[in-house]
């Protein structure tokens, strides 16, 4: 059996459908981006900068703009104003857009000159504050009565041993003094050889004075170096290795009882 399809049969349903579409379409348009925004972007891309500026400014005055739409309006306002020679206004628009979206990027076909100014504005903005981690005591394990049990008490770190600090300091100074004395002794020998090889009396007297001065310096440095090494050797046996006990300060130098007499403590 065939069913005859006539216009009169489907007209009421189509009329209701068109009515619903008529109610839905304006609501959808109101919920989307303002038409001036798309028209302004199109005018900018067609090099109609004055018209683009008017359209974008009209779009910025629309109520209830979403955050992405605000960012796009500011971005394209900056692009239009920069192209029209208003660099100061363009940078203000770029800064406002970047403050709302730090990861904002320019269109792919933007000129390098505008991109350089845009990135310079981004670089001037202060860094976003990082979220501070929450600091607080961690809840410990609870007992049968839902009361927290005391956790294990962390042991205090053991103090590092004091070591033979002065022993190695004096040993290093003594070694340096002996090395300097050896250098002065070598120079004294060279001056003495110059004294022997001198032809003129004045040169001989000058070389002799230098040899005596350098020999004296070498002897003094030898004496200081030897004294420092001897003192370091003594401290090696008497300087404390172990740290003081808890609650006690560093031991003061002095005499302490020892088998058969007393000993010097540092």
Image (cartoon, grey):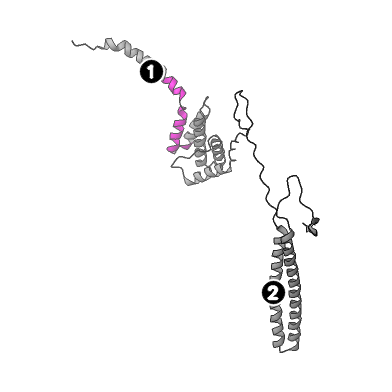
Q: Nearer the viewer, mark 2 or mark 1?
A: 2
Q: Quadrant of the C terminus?
A: bottom right
Along the viewing direction, whichever of 28 and 100 lies nearer the viewer: 100
What residue lies at 49% left-to-right and 34% top-to-bottom?
72
Q: Can the viewer see residue 253?
A: no
Q: Position of 8 compared to 86: left or right?
A: left
Q: Secondary structure at mark 2?
A: helix
Distance CA(mark 2)–CA(mark 1): 106 Å
The image shows residue 35 at horizontal and vertical percentages of 45, 28
Name the element at disc 1. Answer: helix
Give the dominant element type of the magenta stretch: helix, strand or loop: helix
Query: For the point 35% across and 15% down, which residue is it?
Result: 17
Q: Which residue is mark 2?
A: 182
Kindly tell me whether residue 79 is visible in this rendering: yes
Using the rendered view, name the quadrant where residue 24 is placed. Answer: top left
Q: According to the image, label 1 marks what residue?
A: 21
The residue sitting at the front extreme is: 260
Relative side of 128 to 258, left or right? left
Q: Can you name the residue that lies furthest to the left here?
A: 1
Left or right: 233 in relation to 255 = left
Q: Which mark is residue 242?
A: none
* 185 vs 149, nearest the viewer: 149
Residue 209 x/y as whole percent? 76, 81
**Residue segment shown in magenta:** 25-49
Residue 256 among magenta residues: no
Q: Quadrant of residue 240?
A: bottom right
Q: Is residue 113 above or below residue 44?
A: below
Give the percent coordinates (x, y) of residue 19: 38, 14
Dot 1 crowding, Cα within 10 Å, few <14, some 14–19, many 20+: few
């Amino acid at each position: 059996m065939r069913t005859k399809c006539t216009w009169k049969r489907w007209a009421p349903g189509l009329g209701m459908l068109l009515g619903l579409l008529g109610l839905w379409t304006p609501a959808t348009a109101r919920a989307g981006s303002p038409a001036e925004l798309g028209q302004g972007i199109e005018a900018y891309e067609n090099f109609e900068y004055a018209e683009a500026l008017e359209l974008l400014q009209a779009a910025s005055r629309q109520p209830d703009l979403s955050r992405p739409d605000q960012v796009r309006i500011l971005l394209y306002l900056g692009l239009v104003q920069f192209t029209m020679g208003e660099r100061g206004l363009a940078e203000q628009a770029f800064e406002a857009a970047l403050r709302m979206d730090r990861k904002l990027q320019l269109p792919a076909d933007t000129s390098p000159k505008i991109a350089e100014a845009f990135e310079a504005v981004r670089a001037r903005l202060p860094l976003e504050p990082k979220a501070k981690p929450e600091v607080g005591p961690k809840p410990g394990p609870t007992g049968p009565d839902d009361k927290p049990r005391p956790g294990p008490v962390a042991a205090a770190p053991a103090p590092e041993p004091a070591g033979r600090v002065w022993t190695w300091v004096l040993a290093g100074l003594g070694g340096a003094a002996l090395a300097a004395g050896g250098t002065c002794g070598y120079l004294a020998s060279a001056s003495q050889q110059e004294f022997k090889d001198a032809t003129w009396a004045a040169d001989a007297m000058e070389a002799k004075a230098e040899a005596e001065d350098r020999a004296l310096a070498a002897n003094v440095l030898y004496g200081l170096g030897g004294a420092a090494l001897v003192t370091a050797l003594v401290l090696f046996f008497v300087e404390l290795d172990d740290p003081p006990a808890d609650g006690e300060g560093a031991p003061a130098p002095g005499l302490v009882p020892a088998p058969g007499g007393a000993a010097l403590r540092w």
